[in-house]
Image (spheres, rainbow, N blue to C red):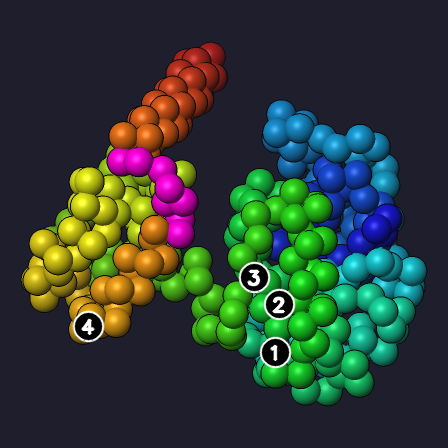
Amino acid sequence: MRTVACVGAGVIGGGWVAHFLARGYRVVAWDPAEDAEERLRGLVEAAWPALTRLGLAEGASPERLSVAATLGEAVSGADFVQESAPERLDLKIGLLAEIDAAAPEHVVVASSTSGYSMSEMQVKADRPERLVVGHPFNPPYLVPLVEVVGGEATAPWAVEWASEFYRAAGKSVITMDQELPGFIGNRIQEAAWREALHMVDKGEATAEQIDLAMTAGPGLRWAFFGPCLTFHMAGGEGGMAHMLDHFGPSLKSPWTRLESPELTADLRDAMVRETDEVVSGRSTAELIAQRDRRLIAVMHALAEVDAAEEREAAQAGR
């Protein structure tokens, strides 16, 4: 792997360009907008200080970016293609078919789509078996998550190859078992967002209160322990099983406007089994110690950034 083609140079596409450059790849970009190259190079320049602090791979340099005049030129010599065009289904369908026709036949092509399934988008490609979704979180050059899933016509090898490539490129990868509208991260995020809108709409909480409730509350823990492991720990030594058996009835309480699924025996057992896999033999005491170390690290890091920003504001007279 030496060369990545990035098709589309907006916020997401440009973020991908910056990420791949920081990981030491040569990047060839293409975007039909007249000012695309100027905007793209400006985005990379703005992102580079943060990427430098995060840590650059050997050989990483903005100088390894080139902007092609045509789509064919961009993808013809690529080892991997990341498409990040605007979210319009007709555009995605046509563009992926064009990329498929122009890219070397062995090369995997990934779409950054946040809303469409690959089954919807691969319908006009001659080689749909090599098309996958590689859904990032913004900004792609800092947030590590990528969700990978194929469509009905995608070959398993393409999903596996894309997942391994993203890992090699420094990403945290979820290889999804099936297509799911909104993918995984967006669905969890959307549930919280919709509840926030409900609370503001009903005058139950302000936007400031909602944001503080998240950033000073569950958001801190979710930086390292997701909701499943967090609720497992709420069960103490009994873990997820005790939590569900004890607090299961609260799922019927009006704590959210999102309707809860019925807590059947099958759902209970699946949650216990799958959370035990995440726990991977760690004791409750070990989990608490790990949680506390990470929570303190996050809080210290945020305090350092807050102090630096306050100094900057004072120097600027704000």
Secondary element at tag 2:
strand
Helix, strand or loop at disc 3? Answer: strand
241 or 80, nearer to the observer: 241
Is the residue under label 2 in contact with that under label 4 (CB below 8 Å)?
no
Q: Which residue is mark 1?
A: 151
Mark earlier in primary sequence (1, 3): 1
Instruction: Work out how far the residue at label 4 is from the one at label 1, CA to CA, in angstroms.
Output: 31 Å
Kindly report the distance in space between the C-alpha atoms of the residues bearing marks 2 and 3: 10 Å
Q: Quadrant of residue 79?
A: bottom right
Counting residues from the start of the chain, the first of labels 4 and 1 encountered is: 1
Gap between marks 4 and 2 measured at Cα:
33 Å
Q: Amino acid at mark 3?
A: Thr
Name the spot of residue 265 as percent of width and height, x first. 20, 70
Q: Which is in the foreground here, disc 4 or disc 2? A: 4
Check whether the beta carbons of the residues at disc 1 and disc 2 lie within 8 A of each other.
Answer: yes
Kind of residue at disc 4: Thr
Hey, what amino acid is under mark 1? Gly
Residue at numbered disc 4? 264
Given this view, does label 2 or label 3 mark the residue nearer the observer?
Answer: 3
Residue 194 in the image: x percent, y percent? 28, 62
Q: Which residue is mark 2?
A: 133
Identify the magenta region: 277-284
Residue 94 spot, x, y in % from top left: 72, 81
Mark 3 = which residue?
Answer: 175
Q: Is residue 168 visible?
A: yes
Which is nearer the N-term, disc 1 or disc 2? 2
Which residue sits at x=73%, y=87%? 124
Give the side of residue 2 with respect to residue 85, left or right.
right
Among the two numbered marks 2 and 3 on one chain, the one whose residue lies closer to the N terminus:
2
Q: What distance separates the C-alpha of mark 4 from that of mark 3?
A: 27 Å
**Picture quarter containing residue 133?**
bottom right
